[in-house]
Image (cartoon, rainbow, N blue to C red):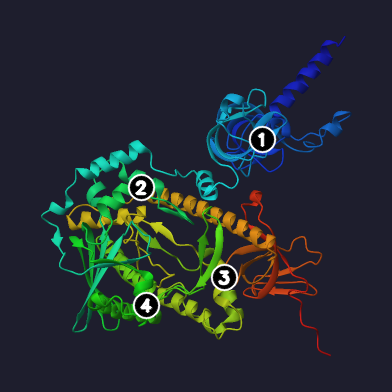
């Protein structure tokens, strides 16, 4: 029996150990392994051993007890190797579990059915009880929800909300990737009906302040299958240039005063374009039946009337609430044949088209001479079969008619930005800061190594930035400097305050011409019309722009993932047909390896050099990887073999180098 002193010592030791523990709240961070981490609000990541991870799901908010690191002794030492020498967290209780819907694949083990979640931080299967399977079969891609949280006994379960499709289902890739990103495939029926009913009650064409421009021969130029036509164009020749009219569909005249419309549209962000599918930002009935500038339909429009000089300079402009009637829907291909002089099938529209072509050429020449124009690169058109799989890929050059529309849109967008900036409106603006502020020293070092003549150019200014970027893009450079400098540049952002768009070398820029497809353009229309009505232009807020930016990011990821999946399917088909080796060019390079864009079809894949028998040294200044015998450089031509496109890695195609690819030339002498 322990005496009083021994009991006191034990109690003191227990109190001491308890005092060393810390009780706090944390967020669960999963890994691809069985263990995880509890991320405390102060940034610390505390180890969660496998037994504790069984009780929680990634993202859970939990109360934890942090135990200080101790060295296990005796028989427990071997069993405790995961926690040996670590500070460990024990789960005390669940506070909140944000994991709601997720996607995955149905798998079975014996008679039991599970879902394998498509979540990078959740590596366990979740059991699906018989009553919650919703007809799903092994191999099906599904959308699920958590049915039972594992906090009590470590045994979670899920229910199937919908079966997206079995392998081979036409369009599976697009629908699955949309669900994976949390995108609704269609508008909820009640929500869409609310918008349509509101639109039916509006009579914008009867507005007394709307200018009748139906006498102008507007035409739309778009893809043959496009139905949600956002814009139509018209131009007239003047004594010193042209007057360009850019008419843009006016959905705000039907929906602008609808409660919560800004929240609804910025949450969707944009129409999402997949190969063979599209998720519309607005209900189809709104776009098609009320707003689209369809041929021979009287429609409300917000028109930007622009004076363009003989030298292509954008001069005075005016925004007009108008009614228009498009004379024709012309295809890019038909207009391109007219622009390049290869066909006179559009002779009936020759007068307005000729003026448009002349204005476009002047605008383009001036932009190329005084601003920055996006670099041309070879484009590719996918042809899909009945199963919406890639049947073939065709390379093509961007058409002159597409450049024509682009220049007219840029002119209208810059006028819209100037109009909002001059009125101190809260945007929205699209801004681009040029070189990253945290990479200024690195930028100067880059220039000193490759173009010392540019070191003293003030690249933080609009003129200086344009001078540097134009010089780096010169074909006379020995290295692909324009591509090499991309890692030092910022990304364009949305803002409520005007600022330069360095990437275009413009004082201010926004997006005005696609309000049926983009929430930002819809907000721009609300702002412009508020100013035309002598009102307050405060429809754009930081919260709305953050919501739109987040939605746009999700949409892009869904689209890109579906594209990679389809590309992987196509590469697998080519391999089955005996085509596995391809020629391509290195389009991105890091210390781990490089991305190759294939010449035949424009598809991309990654060459991972981390497991190569040779060790490679990465030179960020030369954008190159070098080993004892081989060297790889940005833009270099390489031969690669397609290996796989694993789902677990986001369908990124994996390439391996062909034998002897990249060998250094033998030393002379």
Residue at image location 45% in from the left, 50% down from the top: 550
Q: Tag 2, which secondary structure?
A: helix
**Quadrant for the C terminus in the image:** bottom right
Q: Is residue 354 above or below residue 279?
A: below
Callout in the foreground (3, 2) = 2
How packed is label 1: few (under 14 Cα within 10 Å), some, or many (20 or more)?
A: some
Judge left or right: residue 186 versus residue 101: left
Q: Position of residue 331 (x, y in %)?
A: 35, 68
Contact, mark 3 vs mark 1 (Cβ under 8 Å):
no
Under circle 1, the secondary element is loop
Give the mark, 2 or 4, whose residue is nearer the N terminus.
Answer: 2
Q: Is residue 241 left or right of residue 122?
A: left
42, above or below 228, in the image:
above
Residue labelled with disc 2: 265
**Is label 2 or label 1 in front?**
1
To which residue does mark 1 refer? 125
Mark nearest the camera among 1 and 4 is 4
């Amino acid at each position: 029996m322990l005496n009083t002193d021994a009991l006191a010592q034990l109690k003191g030791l227990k109190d001491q150990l308890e005092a060393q523990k810390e009780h706090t709240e944390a967020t669960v961070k999963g890994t691809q392994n069985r263990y995880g981490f509890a991320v405390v609000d102060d940034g610390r990541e505390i180890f969660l051993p496998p037994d504790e991870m069984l009780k929680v799901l990634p993202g859970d908010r939990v109360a934890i007890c942090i135990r200080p690191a101790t060295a296990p002794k005796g028989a427990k030492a071997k069993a405790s190797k995961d926690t040996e020498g670590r500070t460990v967290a024990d789960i005390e209780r669940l506070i909140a579990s944000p994991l709601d819907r997720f996607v995955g694949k149905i798998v079975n083990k014996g008679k039991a059915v599970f879902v394998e979640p498509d979540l990078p931080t959740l590596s366990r299967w979740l059991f699906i009880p018989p009553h919650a399977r919703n007809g799903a079969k092994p191999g099906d891609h599904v959308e699920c929800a958590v049915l039972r949280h594992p906090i009590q006994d470590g045994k979670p379960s899920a229910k199937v909300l919908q079966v997206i499709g079995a392998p081979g289902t036409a369009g599976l890739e697009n629908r699955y990737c949309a669900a994976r990103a949390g995108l609704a495939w269609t508008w909820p029926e009640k929500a869409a009906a609310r918008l349509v009913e509101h639109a039916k009650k509006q009579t914008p064409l009867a507005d007394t302040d709307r200018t009748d421009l139906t006498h102008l021969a507007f035409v739309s130029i778009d893809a043959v299958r496009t139905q949600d036509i956002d814009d139509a164009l018209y131009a007239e020749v003047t004594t010193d240039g042209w007057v360009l009219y850019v008419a843009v569909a006016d959905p705000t005249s039907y929906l602008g005063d609808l409660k919560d419309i800004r929240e609804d549209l910025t949450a969707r962000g944009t129409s999402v374009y997949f190969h063979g599918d599209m998720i519309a930002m607005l209900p189809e009935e709104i776009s098609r039946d009320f707003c689209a500038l369809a041929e021979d339909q009287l429609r409300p429009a917000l028109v930007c009337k622009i004076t363009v000089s003989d030298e292509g300079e954008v001069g005075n402009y005016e925004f007009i609430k108008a009614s228009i009637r498009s004379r024709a829907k012309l295809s890019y291909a038909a207009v391109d044949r007219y622009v390049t002089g290869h066909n006179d099938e559009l002779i009936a529209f020759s007068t307005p088209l000729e003026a448009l072509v002349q204005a476009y050429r002047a605008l383009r020449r001036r932009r190329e001479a005084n601003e920055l124009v996006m670099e041309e690169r070879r484009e590719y058109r996918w042809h899909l079969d009945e199963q919406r799989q890639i049947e073939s890929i065709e390379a093509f050059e961007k058409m002159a008619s597409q450049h024509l529309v682009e220049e007219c849109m840029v002119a209208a967008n810059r006028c819209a930005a100037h109009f909002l900036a001059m009125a101190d409106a809260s945007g929205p603006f699209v801004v681009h800061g040029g070189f990253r502020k945290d990479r200024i020293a690195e930028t100067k070092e880059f220039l000193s190594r490759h173009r010392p003549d540019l070191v003293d150019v003030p690249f933080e200014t609009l003129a200086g930035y344009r001078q540097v970027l134009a010089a780096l893009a010169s074909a006379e450079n020995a290295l692909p400097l324009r591509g090499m400098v991309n890692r030092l540049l910022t990304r364009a952002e949305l803002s409520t305050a005007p600022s330069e768009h360095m990437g275009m070398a413009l004082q201010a820029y926004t997006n005005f011409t696609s309000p049926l497809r983009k929430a930002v353009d819809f907000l721009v229309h609300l702002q412009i019309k508020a100013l035309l009505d002598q009102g307050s232009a405060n429809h754009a807020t930081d919260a709305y722009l953050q919501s739109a930016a987040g939605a746009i990011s999700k949409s892009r990821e869904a689209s890109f993932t579906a594209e990679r999946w389809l590309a992987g399917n196509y590469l697998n088909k080519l391999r089955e047909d005996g085509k596995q080796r391809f020629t391509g060019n290195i389009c991105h390079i890091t210390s781990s390896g490089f991305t190759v864009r294939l010449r035949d079809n424009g598809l991309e894949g990654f060459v991972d050099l981390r497991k190569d028998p040779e060790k490679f040294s990465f030179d960020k200044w030369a954008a190159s990887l070098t080993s004892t015998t081989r060297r790889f450089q940005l833009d270099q031509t390489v031969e690669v073999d397609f290996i796989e496109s694993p789902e677990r890695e986001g369908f990124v195609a994996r390439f391996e180098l062909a034998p002897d690819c990249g060998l250094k030339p033998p030393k002379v002498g």
